[in-house]
C-alpha cells in the first residue's frame, strides 16, 4: 500500500451533523426572549430580523431552538448556506438580507408558526424529557454503531465472513494487548487493525479516541497496519484533536485515515493490503 501524508484540511473537507444545573445567563435570556415573543398566527422575515437585531447571540440561540438543531448542526447548516465569510454577528451585520434568507430556506418561519401555535399536552413534556435524555444517548450510540456497520460491510466484502474479528482485544508485540474494532485476520495474528469512531456532538469522548489509538499503536507489531475511520462534523470544532491524529498518520503510526465519503479509497487500500499480506 502506498505511503501518503494526509493533512487536516483534506480530512475536514471529507466530513459528512456530569449532572449540573443546565441553565445559565444565556439560557435565561433566551427563555425571556421566547416568553416575550409576540404571539402571531403567521411570522414573517421581519420577525426573524427583530429576533436577531435585539441580541444576535440570544436570537440565533432561539432560532436553533425553533429548528431543533444542535449548535454543531446549526453552524454546519449556516456554512453550507452562506459559504465563506463567517456565520456570526459580523456576517449578519454585513448582509442581513442574505443571512435571513438562509434561515428562511431552513423553513424557520414554518417552525416558528408550528411551535408558537401548538397546543401541548402533558405527555409532550415527558416525551421531550425522554428525547433529550435517553434519546440523546441513543443517537450517540447509533452514530458510532452505524459507522462501524459501514466499515464492517466493506471488510466483509474484501476478506469474507471468516476473515476478520470485531470488537476484541488483539495480541501484538511482546504479548501486549489492546482493544480494537476490527482485526484481520484474527486477534492472535493482527496484520491489519481498524478503529472506527463516528461523532454527532462535541464532548470529551472525542479526545478519548487519541488514547485508544495510542494504546493500539503501543501494542501492535511494527509491521501491523493500523487504519482509522471516522466521521462527523463536530471534528470541525475539534481541530486540535484531529490534528494530533493526523500527526500520528504523518509519523507512520497510522497507515491512513478515512471518512465515510472515502469508501472507495478504503476498499481499494484493503484489497491492496490483502494482496501484500497474502490473506
Image: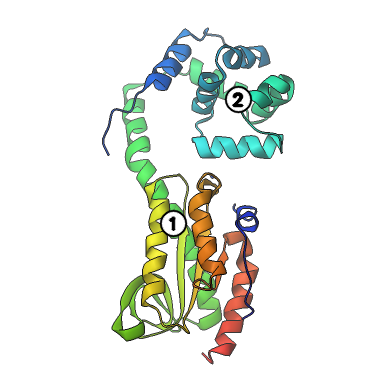
Secondary element at image label 2: helix
Q: Reply above or below: 159 against 81.
A: below
Q: Residues within 10 Å of mark 2 (few under 14, many from 20)?
A: many
Q: Nearer the viewer, residue 118 or 140?
A: 140
Using residue 223 as the reference point, say whether residue 54 is left or right of it: right
Q: Which residue is pictured at 61% across the width and 28% down the height?
A: 88
Q: Position of residue 204 (x, y in %)?
A: 38, 48
Upstream in sequence: badge 1 or badge 2: 2
Using residue 50 as the reference point, say whether residue 174 is left or right of it: left
Q: Nearer the viewer, residue 26 or 78?
A: 26
Secondary element at image label 1: helix
Picture quadrant where residue 211 is located: bottom left
Residue highlighted by disc 2: 108
Quarter of the image containing the N terminus? bottom right
Numbered tag placed on residue 144 in the rendering: 1
**Residue furthest out toward the bottom:** 278
Q: Which residue is pictured at 49% across the width and 26% down the height?
A: 65
Can the viewer see residue 141? no
Q: Position of residue 140 (x, y in %)?
A: 41, 49
Which of the colour schemes (rainbow, by chain, secondary structure, one colour) is used? rainbow
Q: Position of residue 89 (x, y in %)?
A: 62, 24
Q: Position of residue 257 (x, y in %)?
A: 55, 65
Q: Reply above or below: 142 against 202.
A: below
Q: Which residue is pictured at 47% across the width and 19% down the height?
A: 118
Numbered tag placed on residue 170 in the rendering: none
Disc 1 from disc 2: Cα separation? 30 Å
Amino acid at each position: 500500500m502506498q505511503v501518503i501524508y494526509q493533512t487536516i484540511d483534506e480530512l475536514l473537507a471529507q466530513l459528512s451533523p456530569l449532572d449540573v444545573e443546565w441553565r445559565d445567563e444565556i439560557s435565561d435570556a433566551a427563555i425571556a426572549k421566547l416568553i416575550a415573543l409576540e404571539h402571531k398566527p403567521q411570522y414573517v422575515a421581519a420577525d426573524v430580523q427583530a429576533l436577531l437585531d435585539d441580541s444576535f447571540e440570544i436570537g440565533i440561540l432561539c432560532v436553533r431552538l425553533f429548528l431543533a438543531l444542535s449548535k454543531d448542526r446549526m453552524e454546519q447548516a449556516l456554512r453550507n448556506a452562506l459559504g465563506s465569510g463567517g456565520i456570526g454577528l459580523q456576517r449578519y451585520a454585513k448582509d442581513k438580507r442574505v443571512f435571513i434568507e438562509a434561515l428562511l430556506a431552513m423553513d424557520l418561519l414554518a417552525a416558528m408558526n408550528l411551535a408558537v401555535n401548538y397546543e401541548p399536552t402533558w405527555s409532550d413534556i415527558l416525551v421531550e424529557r425522554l428525547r433529550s435524555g435517553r434519546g440523546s444517548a441513543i443517537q450517540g450510540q447509533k452514530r458510532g454503531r452505524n459507522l462501524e456497520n459501514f466499515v464492517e460491510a466493506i471488510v466483509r466484502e474484501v476478506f469474507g465472513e471468516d476473515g476478520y474479528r470485531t470488537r476484541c482485544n488483539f495480541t501484538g508485540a511482546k504479548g501486549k494487548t489492546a482493544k480494537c474494532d476490527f482485526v484481520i485476520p484474527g486477534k492472535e495474528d493482527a496484520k491489519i487493525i481498524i478503529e472506527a469512531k463516528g461523532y454527532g456532538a462535541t464532548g470529551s469522548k472525542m479526545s478519548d479516541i487519541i488514547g485508544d489509538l495510542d494504546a493500539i499503536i503501543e501494542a501492535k507489531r511494527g509491521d501491523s497496519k493500523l487504519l482509522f475511520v471516522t466521521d462527523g462534523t463536530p471534528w470541525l470544532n475539534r481541530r486540535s484533536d484531529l490534528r494530533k491524529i493526523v500527526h500520528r498518520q504523518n509519523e507512520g503510526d497510522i497507515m491512513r485515515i478515512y471518512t465515510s465519503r472515502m469508501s472507495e479509497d478504503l476498499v481499494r487500500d484493503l484489497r491492496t493490503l490483502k494482496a501484500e499480506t497474502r490473506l
